[in-house]
Image: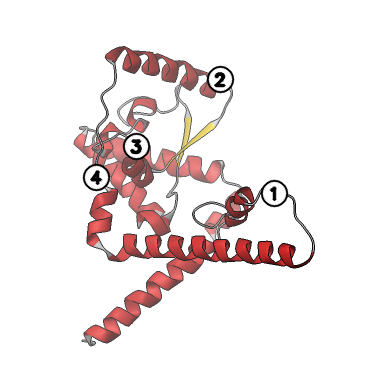
């Protein structure tokens, strides 16, 4: 068994690797730093020393934003209190009529999505963390494509499963399917229904991927 120092070193290396992977995305956290900085400095650029000073301030601000973003990211993955605060639910009271109106709009929008042959991507871990759900069984996928119903009906939307941002939500695609399978079990779907349902979702993921089907066989 390694020492505590060596174990901590290994953990830091893993976190550093995840942070570098996060930076390789199309936009660095928290969004595009260039857009944030340039928005702050929406003033005409001047020449000479003032121009140099303005550029220096832009770069200092860019570095400050980057440092704070990294500190926040690091705290989320290493400080249990920060992680607990992330999952804290903030309750907001809404008029019940608003709920009924929103449900009607959602049903109408779902029909339009089906008619337009638009694929819906669901990210279970992300949806639970950021959405209003307390449990996976409340996820709307069970309303759109219930494993106990006919999955090939013409009024069913096309759904694929994603993992959103593994670096933030500490998950991967196989876990997302496992979460959905467990929730379907809690909703009293049979093992056969769950197996067919998950296969249907996986097949949709392959079908509507930007990669050729042959690449999944490899």
Residue at the disc numbered 3: 131
Q: Residue 5 carries which label?
A: none
Q: Which of marks 2 and 1 is in front?
A: 1
Closer-to-camera residue (64/83): 64
- Residues under labels 2 and 4: Cα distance? 38 Å
Q: Report if the CB atoms under discs 2 and 1 are less than 8 Å apart.
A: no
Residue that label 2 marks: 115
The residue indicated by pointer 4 is 88
Q: In which quarter of the image is the N terminus?
A: bottom left
Q: Can residue 46 be seen?
A: yes
Badge 1 density bin: few <14, some 14–19, many ≥20, Cα 10 Å: few
Image depth: mark 2 or mark 3 in front: 3
Name the residue located 78 percent from the left edge and 66 percent from the top edge. 48
The CA span between labels 2 and 1 is 47 Å
Image position, residue 60 (x, y; %): 57, 66
User: Is residue 134 shown left or right of residue 51?
Assistant: left
User: To which residue does mark 1 refer?
Assistant: 43
Name the side, left or right, on which 214 lies relative to 175: right
Q: Position of residue 97 (x, y in %)?
A: 31, 12
Q: In the displayed structure, does residue 97 sit left or right of residue 41?
A: left
Position of residue 209 measured from the top left corner of the image (x, y, whole percent): 57, 46
Of labels 2 and 4, earlier in sequence is: 4
Q: In this view, does 78 lie above or below 198?
A: below
Q: How crowded is mark 4: few (under 14 residues within 10 Å), some or many (20 or more)?
A: few
Disc 4 to disc 1, how far (Cα)? 40 Å
Locate the C terminus by quadrant: bottom right
């Amino acid at each position: 068994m390694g020492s505590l120092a060596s174990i901590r070193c290994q953990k830091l290396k893993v976190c550093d690797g995840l942070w570098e992977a996060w930076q390789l995305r199309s936009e660095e956290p928290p969004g595009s730093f260039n857009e944030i900085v340039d928005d702050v400095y929406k003033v005409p650029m001047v020449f000479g020393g003032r121009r140099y000073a303005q550029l220096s301030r832009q770069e200092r601000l860019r570095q400050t934003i980057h440092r704070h973003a990294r500190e926040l990211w690091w705290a989320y993955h290493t400080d249990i209190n920060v992680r607990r605060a992330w999952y804290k639910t903030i309750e907001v009271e809404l008029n019940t009529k608003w709920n009924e109106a929103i449900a009607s709009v959602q049903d109408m929008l779902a029909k339009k999505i089906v008619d337009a042959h638009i694929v819906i991507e669901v990210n279970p871990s992300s949806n639970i963390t950021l959405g209003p759900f307390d449990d996976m069984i409340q996820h709307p996928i069970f309303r759109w494509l219930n494993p106990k119903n006919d999955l090939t009906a013409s009024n069913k939307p096309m759904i694929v499963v994603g993992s959103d941002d593994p670096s933030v939500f500490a998950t991967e695609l196989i876990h997302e399917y496992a979460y959905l399978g467990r929730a379907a079990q809690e909703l009293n779907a049979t093992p056969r229904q769950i197996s067919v349902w998950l296969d249907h979702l996986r097949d949709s993921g392959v079908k509507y991927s930007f990669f050729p089907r042959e690449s999944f066989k490899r």
